[in-house]
Image: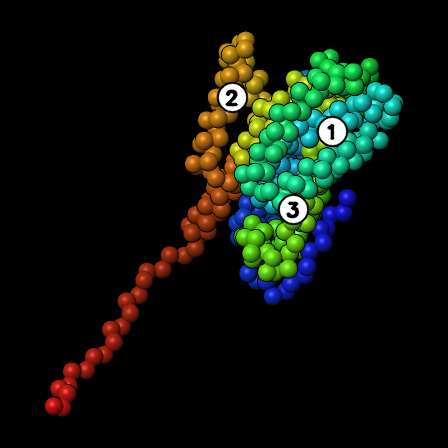
């Protein structure tokens, strides 16, 4: 995959378009703020790399699930937050990637890395088939088409049970990514691999939406007429992003299947696609950190609610809490949790600067001299 989408280079429109490097649609990032964000990211990555040596294997299992789901949410952020396309079928593509990888390893005996490439290729083909009509529909029609695909996916898994395994799904007799050394357990090694793949995916997506591609996406979000008048082929750019988003979603689905060790139709119902969309909105659809926050909510919220209300009622409680969090974010933090944290940090920085700046008393401006009105000659 190329990290650069071919768009025309029109210098006369550069000043009119907000730089895409501005997170959450805000003002351009200043060099000092960019350096702070970079070093914060480095520190966070180092802390995440230390985690497997201080927590249990069960905690690592949940964290690996968060990282895999975060890749799927990040693929939807690329589609929704940066190109303005609404898709409710991302969960189905996520599941297609999982089935493609697991079936490649189970029936063709491919190694895990080759199975990941198969999942990416299958996701690209599916994205191309869906994207050709979907990107021309746009808006509400695009959402209807993708939600139909999400609803049909588990039905097709049951319908072709001889091929997909039906209710039993596809399982592996051994871990997909076993530890190559006795110094690390399988859970520790899997977590480190998934973490590295998540960071690589975020780096790729961040580079993809930067520079010329970001300017084209800003024009598309501003309006189709403005984008076309600037020489941007809106259909081509949207199709390219739809295909790339599908490849990333299938990639995340394959990693998620490796973490679980199996794929079953019950893991990919229609509600799962809707949950990924809600996670994108709640975490922040224009933030890669927001994808991780949304994925953490998806993974940990059912566990929290099950500890409060045991049994089947915990699933309904989790959906209720998810809906409440979504409503609060839409009203209080339209840019999601990540956008709200960023706005709070900016407000605190401005308050700190205002306190450090010397307060000077306002000086009275001298009154202008006036001359008496003269009587106009009659």
Where is mark 3, residue-wise?
A: 238
Please give left or right for residue 227 compared with residue 317 in the image.
Answer: right
* Precedes in sequence: disc 3 or disc 2: 3
x, y percentage for residue 160? 74, 19
How much space separates mark 1 and mark 2, taking CA atoms?
A: 25 Å
The residue lying at 55 percent from left, 45 percent from top is 24
Q: Which residue is mark 1?
A: 97
Specify few, some or many for label 3: CA neighbours under 10 Å numbering under 14, 14-19, or 20 or more.
many
Which quarter of the figure is the N terminus placed in? top right
The residue at which mark 2 appears reads as 319
Q: How many marks?
A: 3
As drawn, the label of residue 147 is none
Residue 136 picture location, percent across and down: 62, 45
Q: Residues within 10 Å of mark 1 (few under 14, many from 20)?
A: many
**Residue found at the very far right of the displayed protein:** 109
Residue 329 versus residue 58: which sits nearer the camera? Answer: 329
**Can residue 326 be seen?**
yes
Residue at the image position 75 percent from the left and 37 percent from the top: 125
Q: Nearer the viewer, residue 64 or 91?
A: 91
Q: Position of residue 295 (x, y in %)?
A: 61, 29
Q: Earlier in the sequence, mark 1 or mark 2?
A: 1
* Disc 1 + disc 2, Cβ < 8 Å: no
């Amino acid at each position: 995959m190329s990290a650069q989408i071919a768009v025309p280079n029109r210098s006369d429109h550069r000043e009119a378009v907000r730089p895409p490097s501005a997170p959450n649609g805000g003002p351009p990032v200043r060099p000092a703020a960019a350096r702070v964000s970079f070093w914060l990211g480095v520190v966070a990555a180092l802390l995440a790399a230390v985690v497997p040596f201080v927590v249990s294997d069960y905690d690592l299992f949940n964290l690996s699930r968060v990282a895999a789901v975060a890749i799927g949410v990040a693929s939807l952020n690329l589609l929704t937050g940066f190109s303005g396309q609404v898709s409710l079928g991302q969960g189905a593509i996520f599941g297609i990637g999982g089935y493609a990888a697991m079936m490649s390893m189970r029936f063709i005996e491919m190694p895990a890395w080759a199975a990941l490439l198969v999942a990416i290729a299958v996701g690209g083909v599916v994205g191309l088939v869906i994207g050709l009509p979907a990107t021309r529909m746009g808006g509400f029609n695009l959402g209807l088409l993708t939600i139909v695909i999400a609803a049909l996916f588990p039905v097709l898994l049951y319908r072709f049970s001889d091929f997909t395994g039906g209710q039993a799904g596809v399982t592996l007799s051994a871990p997909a990514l076993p530890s190559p050394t006795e110094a690390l357990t399988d859970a520790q090694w899997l977590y480190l691999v998934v973490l590295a793949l998540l960071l690589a995916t975020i780096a790729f997506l961040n580079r993809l939406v930067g520079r010329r591609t970001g300017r084209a996406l800003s024009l598309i979000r501003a309006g189709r007429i403005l984008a076309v008048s600037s020489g941007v082929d809106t259909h081509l750019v949207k199709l390219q992003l739809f295909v790339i988003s599908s490849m990333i979603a299938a990639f995340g689905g394959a990693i998620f299947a490796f973490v679980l060790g199996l794929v079953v139709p019950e893991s990919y119902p229609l509600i799962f696609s809707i949950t990924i969309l809600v996670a994108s909105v709640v975490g922040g659809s224009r933030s890669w950190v927001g994808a991780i926050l949304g994925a953490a909510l998806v993974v940990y919220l059912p566990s929290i609610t099950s500890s409060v209300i045991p049994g089947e009622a915990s699933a309904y409680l989790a959906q209720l809490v998810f809906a409440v969090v979504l409503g609060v974010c839409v009203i209080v933090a339209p840019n999601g949790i990540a956008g709200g944290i960023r706005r709070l940090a900016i407000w605190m920085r401005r308050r700190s600067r205002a306190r450090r700046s010397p307060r000077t008393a306002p000086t009275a401006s001298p009154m202008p001299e006036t001359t008496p009105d003269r009587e106009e000659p009659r």
